[in-house]
Image (cartoon, grey):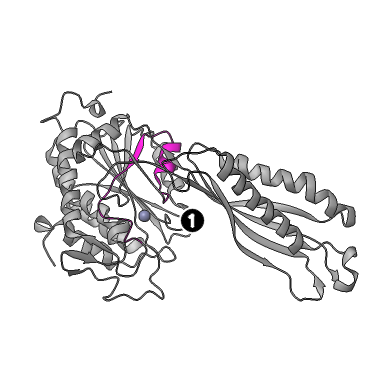
Amino acid sequence: MLSESVMTSRDILAHLVGFNTVSSTSNLALIDWVRGYLERHGIRSEVIRDETGTKAHLWATIGPDRDGGIVLSGHTDVVPVDGQPWTSDPFTLTERDGRLYGRGTADMKGFIAVALNAVERFKAAALDRPVHLAFSYDEEIGCLGVPSLLEAIGQHGIRPVACIVGEPTMMKLVVGHKGILCARGHVRGLECHSSMAPEGVNAVQYAARIIDFVRRETERRYKEGPFDHRFTPSTTTLHVGTVHGGTAFNIVPRDCRFDLEIRHLPTEDPHRILQSVERYCRDVLEPEMRAVAPETGITFSVVCDTPGLAADPESDIAATVRRITGDNDSAVVAYTTEAGHYSRAGYPTIVCGPGSMEQGHKPDEFIEASQLEAGDRFMETLAGMLGRKDVPSDNTLRSD
Ligand SMILES: [Zn+2]
């Protein structure tokens, strides 16, 4: 075991990858290791557990105990490795040809490693405003964890002025992504012998009409918009990904359940889109169903709601990241992140982190060693900008 004083981002990453934190398992061992690491650097952390006690967020503050500051945000969970052909053990950091292999190296333990590695730099910078570390759980299953972390931040009365979500962007500034709303639909029909079909209410066939409505709604959007040509496709898309219904060919099915996903432009309200589907059910389908059997009906329940991100490319945090990275672009990405939640909570948020999502979720996921170094340099420059020394005169992030 290396002593902490000579630990590099790579050493820290090796520790983090060593903890199997697939979303379906506990992340407590990793959180405990991070807590211990920070404690050895004189930083106290708060561990915020979920109701089951098997998962936790970590929140820590470096620098002055005062309002404001910047959040460095990462998720600790990773996607499963089941059925994937890995060349080496996914939970052992393995270097081959300048690449560091392991589950979560790119998405996104690499960022957590560079953030932790920068703790001493932040301390030495004599920060004018705090730097907060916010490490969450359950991001990979629909950003389900982060709302409780944001609630805890809110309860502390801490109002960070900006947040950097370190999902892998090859250290480029990302200011936007789509959002996702998932809803589970349930058609409750009435079963009967299929020879007497008109006496029943066929839940599968009503579900099919909803699914067709969803298809037509998406195709209408392809033609009419709204459009945001930074994205491919440039419109909101709706689709049904699963359908389950019926029990036998000769029974009119009573139940049909399906999953509706709305991948929406960050400027569109997905709840209004869901309401349009519900309106079709209420105004067109349910009256037909209830004419046969009044107890029938259609319900939807929202199972995930990840807001999109539409950050102001001219915000202080975007300008700061641009200055650090030298990247003058303001890109958008296809995947979703916790940035939408931070942004919805009122914190100006952008995405920027080491590694590429090209490698995320795949077998033999890796991060280029040079990307970790780029992440280290980013933190070093950020520390300099947030500290009392060497502050560029136009850096508004440190002022009120
Ligand atoms: Zn991620």
**353 drawn magenta:** yes
Residue depicted at 71% across the width and 59% down the height: 208
- Residue 370 percent location from the top left of the image: 16, 56
Front-lying residue, 144 or 392? 392
Region of the chain picked out in magenta, as a range: 335-360
353 left or right of 153 in image: left
Q: Quadrant of the N terminus?
A: bottom left
Which image quarter holds the C terminus?
top left
Q: Is residue 86 visible?
A: yes
Q: Is residue 242 above or below residue 228?
A: below
Q: Find out whether residue 140 is within the magenta segment.
A: no
- Which quarter of the rendered image does ligand 1 occupy? bottom left
**Residue 24, percent from left and from top:** 44, 65
Vertical relation: 210 (above or below) 130: below
Q: Can you say whether 125 is above or below 26 in the image?
A: above
Residue 172: percent from left, percent from top: 26, 44
Q: Main secondary structure of the magenta part?
A: loop
Q: Circle 1 sits on which residue?
A: 51
Which type of secondary structure does the marked residue at label 1 adopt? loop
Q: Is residue 241 left or right of residue 69?
A: right
Crowd around label 1: few <14 · some 14–19 · many ≥20 (10 Å): few
- Please state if 371 lies on the left or on the right of 138 as rendered: left
Name the residue: 15% across, 27% down: 392
The answer to which quarter of the image holds residue 249 is bottom right
Please report the residue visible at 34 percent of the width from the left and 60 percent of the height from the top: 360
Amino acid marked by disc 1: Glu
Residue 239 picture location, percent across and down: 58, 55
Examine the rendering and report whether any part of residue 130 can be seen: no
